[in-house]
């Protein structure tokens, strides 16, 4: 009787450990399948201006991802978008694209020609920077956003 009880407990233990092992393997596969890049700010700029903007955001100790094309990595999480190109059409287009993709993002755009200011607002831009972009403009824009959302 004791022998049958021990064998039964071993069989139940084996199946129980097998189930726990499978559960752990499945959870590990899911968490490693798509790594998430949790940078807070996405920046769109001209290739020749990238270094200047990188220095500004590093000076402000801000986590950022910078791009000069309309391809955004699918695994990138951001709360704020800066359109800092010298081309108003690109800034408006990319701002509108971001607004559609991530409606809750705070969007800041540089206006190169003031006649386009209204188009920026229609594209969903929350804050417009007129003239030269400096660290002060960026710092003011960053203060308006709550990154804990």
Image: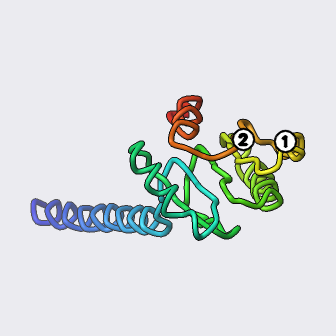
Mark 1: few, some, or many residues within 10 Å (few <14, many ≥20)?
some
Which residue is at the front of the view, 75 or 111?
Answer: 111
Q: Quadrant of residue 19?
A: bottom left
Residue 108 vertical position relative to residue 22 in the rendered view, above or below: above
Question: In the shown orientation, is residue 99 left or right of residue 21?
Answer: right
Contact? badges 2 and 1 (CB < 8 Å): yes
Name above or below for residue 20 compared with residue 118. Answer: below
> Which quadrant of the figure has residue 70?
bottom right
Q: In the rendered image of this protein, does residue 85 appear above or below residue 120? A: below
At 64% across and 66% down in the image, what residue appears? 46
Q: Disc 2 designates what residue?
A: 130
Which residue is located at x 66 percent, y 43 percent? Answer: 105
Point out residue 96 in the picture as x, y percentages from the top left corner. Answer: 80, 52
Q: Which mark is residue 64?
A: none
Q: Position of residue 23 (x, y in %)?
A: 39, 62
Q: Secondary structure at mark 1?
A: helix
In 3D space, how far apart are the residues under numbered discs 2 and 1 (Cα atoms)? 9 Å
Q: In the rendered image, which quarter contains the C terminus?
A: top right
* Helix, strand or loop for disc 2: strand
Horizontal and vertical percent for residue 40? 51, 47
Q: Is residue 11 left or right of residue 26?
A: left
Looking at the picture, tell me which residue is in the foreground, 72 or 12: 72
Q: Which residue position is annotated with label 1? A: 117
Give the quadrant of residue 89. bottom right
Q: Is residue 18 left or right of residue 51?
A: left
Question: Who comes first in sequence, dot 2 or dot 1?
Answer: 1
* Residue occupying the far left of the picture: 2
> x, y (%) of residue 132?
64, 46
Which residue occupies the foreground of this view, 5 or 132? 132
Residue at left offset 47%, top offset 57%: 54
Q: At x 52% / y 55%, what residue is drawn?
A: 53
């Amino acid at each position: 009787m004791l022998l049958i009880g021990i064998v039964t407990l071993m069989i139940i233990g084996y199946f129980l450990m097998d189930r726990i092992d499978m559960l752990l393997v499945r959870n590990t596969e899911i968490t490693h399948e798509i790594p998430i890049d949790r940078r807070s700010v996405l920046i769109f700029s001209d290739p020749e201006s990238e270094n200047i903007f990188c220095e500004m955001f590093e000076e402000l100790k801000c986590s950022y991802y910078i791009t000069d094309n309309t391809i955004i990595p699918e695994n990138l999480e951001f709360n704020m978008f800066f359109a800092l190109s010298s081309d108003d059409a690109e800034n408006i287009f990319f701002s509108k694209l971001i607004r559609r993709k991530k409606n809750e993002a705070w969007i800041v755009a540089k206006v190169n020609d003031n006649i386009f200011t209204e188009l920026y607002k229609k594209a969903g831009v929350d804050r417009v920077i007129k003239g030269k972009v400096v660290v002060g403009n960026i710092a003011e824009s960053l203060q308006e956003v709550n990154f804990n959302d």
